[in-house]
Each structure stands twice: as structure tokens, then as C-alpha cells.
Amino acid sequence: MSPSLLWFRRDLRVADHPALAMAAENGPVLAVFVLDPTLVSTSGRPRASALRDALLALDEAIGHRLCVVRGDPATEIPRLAEAIGAGTVVVSADHGPYGTRRDAAVERTLAEAGRGFVRVGSPYAVTPGRVLTANGTPYKVFTPFRRAWYEHGWPAPADTGSESAEWLDPAEIALPEHRPDTDRPLRDLLRSTLGTGDSPLEVCESAASAQWADFLEHGLPGYADDRDRPDLDATSRLGAQLKFGTIHPRTILADLAALGPTTGLGTGLAESRDAFASELAWREFYADVLHHYPSTAGGNVDVRWDRFPWVSGDHADEAFAAWRDGRTGYPIVDAGMRQLLAEGWMHNRLRMVVASFLTKDLRVHWRRGARHFMDHLVDGDLASNQHGWQWTAGTGTDAAPYFRVFNPVTQGKRFDPEGDYVRRWVPELRGIAGAAVHTPREGGHGDYPAPIVDHAEARREALALYDSVIRGA
DNA sequence: TTTTGAGTTGTTCGA
DNA sequence: GTCGAACAACTCAAA
């Protein structure tokens, strides 16, 4: 049997891996990861560090047989395939705009040499493009998508393709006879390409499994009640693991289903299970939207917004810098932005609050905020990030009603009721007890910077401008 | 084809 | 302090 080449991308695990199973079934396998300069340069330090560690862990998990090369995949993959005489290159499908183009180019080059390119599985429970309305058109509204997505269903982890799909023993994967030598130790290559900094989160298959098991036992029961509370540790933080594929959403959904029928669960747990599954559905929805409309990675879903008067010039630069550095004068916004810079992560509630503030209060283009998030989030995912921003900005799927403008003070008081979260990230406010921390100047703490905009006034202006966009004025 | 129901995550105002 | 109504009109999805 001729060897095949397994090209890892966003599927850095061994368990429940249909592409790996298929490759291994057909003979010797060379496992490859390509450090693509185009992707590395847009990754941001936290994700680069996480990728480095995930690759080291994957290499160890497959008996130090991972072949990592640096370069353009359109050159490197065909070159390696030729070096080992691979008949086929196997991948988990990628549906992003860049990945789709890249894979098409690789597939063409391979075909010219008579080699196959096979896509098996994807990083989603339901492959983007599979869930369609009765008319055969993509969904543009989340709720109907979620219903159809549930009804579509997904394979259980155990039947993802073949007998050997589950818990494949990496030691049993044969290597091709002429395995290309890598020119230097993997750790050095990864550190020189992806940096030496600490990753904000341990991203690898074993950490992902442990993290999910821990959340399932301890976090899920309170999820419905506490998930919006940034002062508590009430979310799963699995985003980064899903982004790199160190755990597959199918695995998570199977464990949720295994909790049993809703009637057997307490109402709290049943509600929490639905809420958590919904978050996965959002991830799949946005991947589906991006798959169907690749231009929305940078352009407005609702093109009427193309004429919205975002601010520009020095004024925009100053407003953006104040937002980015966490000195807007609104404690909950400043706390969130500082957490992002310090931790490479921000609570989802605050992602909405700060995104609303940048786009509605400061009227800076959502794309600029989205870029900043991608530069700093360890879990930064193009589809979820760009569409989450568009949702908040009002330019996206199911455009926000014009009246939905987050009030940063109200949001702070509601979701950080004791003020603990603000004090954790804004040390200069630690002298203020309780929820008063959300309105420092009311308590005579005049040393905290004044709000850079008056929210009530900014809200009125944003609503008026929204009106002009919708009416085409 | 037409009709109908609904749309993650909010805020403000007035009773 | 709490609660319900108002905030518009449109698009989407399904019957």
C-alpha cells in the first residue's frame, strides 16, 4: 500500500479524528504540520504560543513522529507527498476564506502529479454548508438555524468513519519508508517561529479533555445562572481548545447527550445543557455564514451599513487607543480591555460590552476592534470573532434592533454586582467597595479619568445615525 | 403566492 | 425598587 500524508491544521488531536483514522487504515502515514507564514503573521502572540505548545504535545502523542515544516503549503505539501511517494493527502476540511483557497491550490498541484486530496470531517459537529432551509438556501437567522442544526444531528464519536476511528494507538501507525528528516529539533523550530512566551492556557489534547471533564462536573450545573458573570469563573474557556481542535465539538455534544433525557435532569441542569449547546450552535452558525458569504470576514453582512459614518483620522485613533488600553473612564470597559491584554482572554459578556462601546459610543469601525481581538485572544476564531463583532455593531446577521446599545454602567452593575471584577483589573479603583466602583466619580473619586464620551449623548447620536442608514438617507 | 410569527445577549420611562 | 410597555420597521423562515 502506498503511504499517505496526513496534514494537520485545526485538528491537533489523536482521538475522534476521522481523517487520521482514514489515513492510518490505508497504510503508512506521515503526519505533517506546515507553519504557514501567512497564518503565523496574523496569529497574535497568545495564539502563536498556544499553537507551539499544542504542536509539541501532538508530537509527543504520536511518538515524536510529527513532521513540521515552514513555508507555503501549496509548495510544501506536494513536495513532502512526492518525497514519500504518497498517493493521497488527507485533511479535515477547512471552510474559512483563506483555507478554502489554500486547499484548492494544494489540491490542484497534487492532482497534476496524480495524487489525491481527501477531506474527511471538519472542526464542526455539522460541516458548514450542510444545514439549509427548505428552499435550499443558507440560514441568516440564528434561532431557525439552531433548530435545523439540532434536527440534522451529528455522528457519535464512536462511529466517525471506521473501526479504528476511536482511540487509535499512534504507535501502530506505520511510518513511510523514506521519511523526510527535519533539519533541526522541533522545539527550536517552533520557538523561533512562534515565540517563546507563555501561552495563556494549556492548549493540547490532554488538557482539553481534563478541562472539559472538569467543566462538565463542576461548571455545567450553574452555567445557565452564572455564565454572564465575569466576576465568577463560570464559563468553560474551551474556545481555544475548539479553535485548535484539541477537542472536537462532537465529543462535547455526545457527553451532553449522555447526561440523559431532559426529564431526568433537574431544571437547572437541563437549562444549562441547552445554554451550553447553544453556544456551540453559535460557533457552527457563524462558521456556516462565513462559508456561504466569505466576504463577510471583512465586509458588512448588511451592506446598507457600508455608508455608515464611522469616525476616522486622529480623533478615531485617539478613541481607539483609549479603548484598547483600558482608559475610557468606564470601569467595566477598562477592566475588560485590560484583562484582554493581560490574559489573552476576555469574558464573553464583556466582549459584547466593549464592542458596543467601541462601535456605538465611539463610532469606530467594528473591523478595527475585531482586528485587536484577533491580535490578542488566545481563542480568536475568524468566523466567531468577525460575526460576533458584526452582531454587536448591528451590521451582521439578524441586525440588532436600533435600540440595542449597551449602557456600560448598567451592564457593570448587573453582571459584576459586587464590583469584584472591576477591582481585579483596575487596581486604582480598589479603594472603592461594592458596586460603587462602577461610578467612581459619583463617590468623589475624581482621580479616575472622566468618561471619554457621555454615554447618553453618544447613544442618542448613534440611534439617529442608525436611523439614517436604515432609511437610506 | 401570501400570510404569519418571530427575531440571544438592551435601555428608558412612567406607573 | 419593580414592572411592563415602548422603542420601528424589516427580514427571515415556514406554513
Image (cartoon, coloured by chain):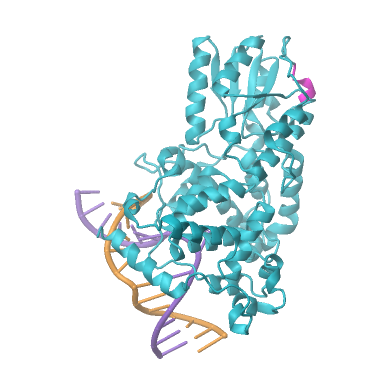
Chain colours: A cyan, B purple, C orange
Placement of the C terminus of chain A among the 4 image quadrants? bottom left
Residue A112, image x and y in percent?
49, 11
User: Which portion, as a residue range, is magenta?
Assistant: A170-174
- Which of A327 and A437 lies nearest the eye of the viewer? A327
- Residue extending furthest front? A314
Whether residue A162 is visible here, answered yes or no, is no
Residue A2, image x and y in percent?
65, 9
Which residue corresponds to the image point at 64% horizontal and 60% vertical from the top-left? A338
Which image quadrant for residue A193? Answer: top right
Which residue corresponds to the image point at 72% horizontal and 42% vertical from the top-left? A203
Q: Is residue A129 above or below residue A425?
A: above
Q: Is residue A288 left or right of residue A376?
A: left
Whether residue A201 is visible here, answered yes or no, is yes
Which image quadrant for residue A41? Answer: top right
Which image quadrant for residue A337? Answer: bottom right
Q: Is residue A168 left or right of residue A290?
A: right
In reply to whether residue A21 is colored magenta, the answer given is: no
Placement of the N terminus of chain A among the 4 image quadrants? top right
